[in-house]
Amino acid sequence: MQPLENIRVLDLSRVYAAPAGSMMLADLGAEVIRIEHPNGSDSMRDWGPFVKDQSTYYLCANRNKKSILLDLKTIEDREKFKELVKDADIVLENFKTGDMARMGLSYEELKKVNPRIIHCAVTGFGQTGPLAQEPGFDPVIQAMSGLMHVTGSTEGEATKVGVPIADILTSNYVVISILAALRMRDQTNTGQFIDLALLDVQMSSLANVASAYLNTGFTSQRLGNRHNNVAPYQVFQCADGPLMICVGTDGQFQRFCALLKREEWTNDPRFLSNTMRKQHEDELVRMITDITLTKTRDEWILLLQQYKIPGGRVNTIAEALEQPQFIARDMIGEIEHEQYGTIKFVKNPLKFSNLNIQYKLAPPLLGEHTNEFQKSSLL
């Protein structure tokens, strides 16, 4: 039994922010039906690199789903969509604010068809506010949220994160909010509308950076791989490359000094507390780097593990996907596609004691399951 196996999701979403969320729902057993325009409405299908002519970007967010074709700008297909809503649990979409209403498919209209429907709308800026009508893309959200301001080297320009982090975080909130709405529906027998904005999500993810400013006025700066509040807590160069070392407590610093055979540092007035270490960070980092350059990363990692100090190699993507810990966790999956053969993917990270996530369907071709639904009289 899968926890969401009796849940049907009508997925109108495109690109990554919402599709990655519906994929997680599908992994947990929900029947997720991608509803796409006959001419193709998801630009992610066009973004390379490709497996034959299938986008690897598209593949990463659309397993375990079905795809049918509807043109919601036509009255006929809008009526077909409403028929699907009657037996659905969730409508997920990331159209611009107001687009669903202009098509006569707002939550107010959909709940007339099915009072239990849960409508989750993902937009750049939400359903209210002066920017509600504006489109929002991940890099724009990273810029506007302040995330780019605190990302990158001290001397360099503001830098976006190397993955669409605002989209990824929003997808997680898609799942959280929908599961909460389903639980509430169990108690009230009614659905509801969920308004998720990428900017809201990314702003809420500023965590300690936002808290520091709101409560003290402290503005975090762009420090590269250093930490705004803790030292030593950064990348250090070793004989064969970079290594991330995180010394987060005074106790860890004492052990780190023992590891480096510099026990005298623990009595140095400059380094007695994290506050003092932060004030003398440049000098401390130079002293540490002189030592880390004398050994390889693997040699230092063995010592860090021995002394219980958090640390890890700065891996390339290839190194990360091939590292023994990742392999031991059985995190690479394979699924067969009738047209494209074996497709590899990173598995869902959720691991349960009494539930095995199943990977049954390869990411669907455009409209691949339309005939199936027509034959079942659902279209």
Image: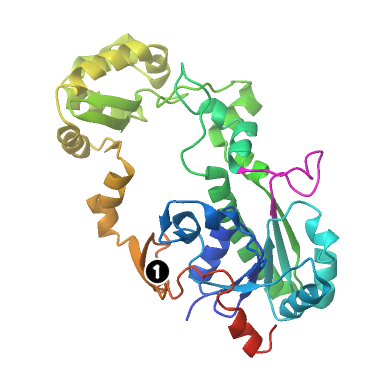
- What's the image's color scheme? rainbow
Label total for image: 1
The residue closer to the viewer here, 233 or 336, is 336
Q: Is residue 376 above or below residue 166?
A: below
Q: What residue sits 22% from the left and 23% below the top?
A: 257
Q: Which residue is mark 1?
A: 340
Mark 1 residue element: loop
Could you tell me which residue is drawn at 26 percent across and 51 percent down? 322
Residue 316, image x, y percentages: 31, 40
Query: Residue 217: x percent and y percent?
Result: 63, 21
Relative to 332, is 143 above or below? above
Residue at 74% across, 51% down:
96
> For this view, does 359 lie left or right of residue 175?
left
Q: Quadrant of residue 193?
A: bottom right
- Position of 121 with respect to 49 (left or right) is right
Residue 6 location (% of width, % of height): 59, 80
For residue 25: magenta? Answer: no
Q: Main secondary structure of the magenta part?
A: loop
Position of the C terminus by quadrant: bottom right
Horizontal arrangement in the rendering, residue 120 relative to residue 1 (left or right): right
- Residue 127 highlighted magenta (yes or no): yes
The quarter of the picture where residue 109 lies is bottom right
Q: Residues within 10 Å of mark 1 (few under 14, many from 20)?
A: few
Give amino acid for label 1.
Tyr
Residue 47 placement (x, y as % from top left): 51, 51
- The residue sitting at 51% across, 64% down in the picture is 62
Residue closest to the eye, 238 or 263? 238
Q: Is residue 161 above or below residue 294?
A: below
- Residue 178 lies, with reference to residue 261, above or below; the image says below
Please indicate whether residue 363 sits to the left or right of residue 202 in the image: left
Magenta residues, as a range? 122-137
